[in-house]
Image (cartoon, rainbow, N blue to C red):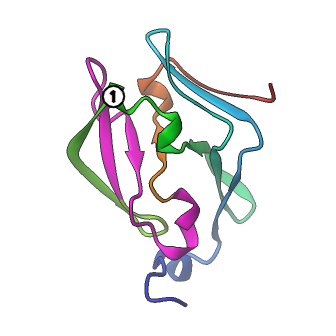
Amino acid sequence: MSANSGPGFTQYPNHRLVAKPADSRVRVTYRGVIIADTREAVQLEETMEGSTVAPIVYYLPRKDVKMERLVRTEHETYCPFKGRASYYSIVGGPENAAWTYERPYDEMVALKGRLAFYPDKVDSIAASRD
């Protein structure tokens, strides 16, 4: 175990998180405008004892997100598997609509600096094979 290992992995050994390339194009829209469009998303799958505990979450590289449409907030949360999350609001839209792990635990380094969006705070998060 590394010095920056997530404590959740030892505390909850039946809870699994798998981060892997999404192998699809992911677009995020808000009020009909595309605010993110990438072919380099990472998808996170969470299971516990073989059952899905959360829908797939797509983490998008910042270079493919219209960062000028977002503003950093003071809000933070903590996950024992991923680490501390920082949040962004959509300018003129919902607060804390996106989050990022800037210094994730070693097991989740694939998420570092990427953004994920809450599906109920944007119009859509669509993954397609085009």
Q: Is residue 123 above or below residue 127?
A: above
Q: Which residue is depicted at the point 27% across and 30% down?
A: 95
Q: Residue furthest right?
A: 129
Residue type of the residue flagged with mark 1: Glu
Q: Which residue is depicted at the point 31% across and 44% down?
A: 87
Q: Is residue 72 above or below residue 46?
A: above
Q: Is residue 64 above or below residue 59?
A: above
Residue 125 place in picture, x, y as percent: 58, 27
Residue 6 place in picture, x, y as percent: 47, 76
Q: Which residue is depicted at the point 63% across and 44% down?
A: 41
Q: The residue tagged with tag 1: helix, strand or loop?
A: helix
Say which quadrant the N terminus sits in.
bottom right
Q: Residue furthest left?
A: 74
Residue 78 place in picture, x, y as percent: 34, 61
Magenta part of the protein: which range?
Answer: 85-111
Mark 1: few/some/many CA within 10 Å (<14, 14-19, 20+): few
Q: Which residue is depicted at the point 49% across and 68% down?
A: 81
Residue bearing the label numbered 1: 68
Nearer to us in this view, 96 or 129 = 129
Q: Quadrant of residue 104?
A: bottom left
